[in-house]
Image (cartoon, grey):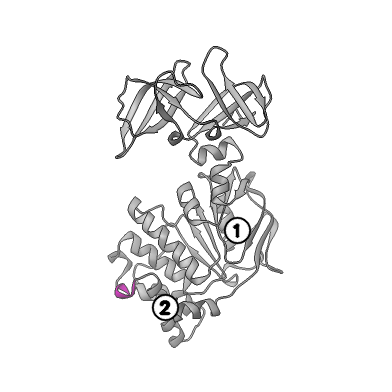
Amino acid sequence: MTAEVVAARGARGTFGALRLEGVTRRFGKAVALSGLDLLIEGGEFLALLGPSGCGKSTALNCLAGLLPLSEGGIWLDDERIDGLPPERRGFGMVFQNYALFPHLSVRRNVAFGLSVRRVGKAETARRVDEALRMVELTEHENKLPGQLSGGQQQRVAIARAIVLRPRLVLMDEPLSNLDAKLRVQMRTEIRRIHQDLGLTTVYVTHDQEEALALADRVVVLRAGRVEQIGTPEDVYTYPASTYIAGFMGYRNLLELPVLSAADGRVTLGEPDGPELTGVAQEAVEGTRAVAAVRPEDFRVAASGQDGNALSVRVEVSEFHGREVAAEGVTDGGQVIHFRTPERIAPGERVTLTVPPERVLVFQGEGDG
């Protein structure tokens, strides 16, 4: 660890926890965020995950002070801060569109916040040098933003945020404008900077892969409310609803009658059709439930193999390098998405199997 990083950690404002209680934001009669309760530990990387309109950016803007609360409060340790203007909260912000000054050099962009806070010239120069080294942009410090790539511009935006040594860094979908390769590279850089500086970060994204890769905890939002909070492993492996399961890659959500349920195992299926046995906390025989299966958990098996076997007619086959992403249809009309290293073509009939422990069953959630 460099001396600059150690100095940054020592000078940075620290806190024990950031607490949101009943945070609500309305726009007229529309409720964008409803009764959000959340505890963010100092040093944590928290991801707010969900589709457009779920309330994640509204929550971030309420934290930043860019939107006033309709109800509720925000506390930083014992200090209530929701009445403070943005500049007095001591937070850094990284926007989706970078929000750089096009007429200022990289160095002057990074230094801007320090000049507003009237930090001395020598201290400003030292801290800007440190921030530029952290994001590996020292050799580009005299360029204008328009002379940089998208990834480099995002690094400037991150440097401008961390140079202030903020108590909290807020990131609003910072990688959404980058291509796939750059997104992966910048994802690694963001996590590295978070760890090296001991930052506390709240990160908004609609990309479940980003949330799982970066966060210590993930908050999944739906229609302005919390749907689930947990570690990436918990949310990925044990989604709390079909909504979250779909968001976490369980692309197959099959609504079927419950034929039997005992000892945590549930069997679903039509009376004269194939059956699926899966895992559920509770299920009621005679009702309908949803079986959730990831495409990669299906296996193409020998015809007639017993146990969670589905016969499908291949409709679509997409080459993805080492495997094929395919879509098949059962005789009952259920669409099944699966992945396989086998080379299969539309029109073929294959038998798919999946272990019962890879089938999650959700009772009474037929709306998906």
Give the extent of the magenta segment: 137-141
Q: Is residue 87 above or below residue 26?
A: below
Q: Which residue lies at the image location 30% right of the left edge and 65% below the top edge?
A: 148
Numbered disc 2: secondary structure: helix
Q: Nearer the viewer, mark 1 or mark 2?
A: 2
Q: Quadrant where the C terminus lies?
A: top right
Q: Where is residue 210 shown, x and y percent of the image? A: 46, 52
Going by the picture, which residue comes out furthest to the left? 147
Q: Which residue lies at the image location 34% right of the left edge and 56% below the top edge?
A: 182
Q: Where is residue 334 shown, x and y percent of the image? A: 47, 21
Residue in front for this viewpoint, 39 or 237:
237
Residue in front for this viewpoint, 196 or 133:
196
Task: Please give the residue where the numbered disc 2 appears in the rendered image.
Answer: 130
Task: Please give the residue where the numbered disc 1 appears in the rendered image.
Answer: 62
Q: Which residue lies at the image location 39% right of the left edge and 65% below the top edge?
A: 155
Q: Is residue 159 above or below residue 291?
A: below
Q: Where is residue 140 shown, x and y percent of the image? A: 30, 72
Q: Quadrant where the N terminus lies?
A: bottom left
Q: Where is residue 157 shown, x and y percent of the image? A: 42, 66
- Tell me if residue 95 can be seen: yes
Dots 1, 2 in contact, CB < 8 A: no
Alpha carbon separation for disc pair 1 and 2: 30 Å
Going by the picture, which residue comes out furthest to the top? 272
The question of residue 226 being in magenta is answered with no
SS majority, magenta: helix
Q: Quadrant of residue 337?
A: top left
Q: Is residue 209 left or right of residue 90?
A: left
- Tell me if residue 98 can be seen: no
- Identity, as a three-letter code, of the amino acid under mark 2: Glu
Disc marking residue 242: none
How many discs appear?
A: 2
- Identity, as a three-letter code, of the amino acid under mark 1: Cys
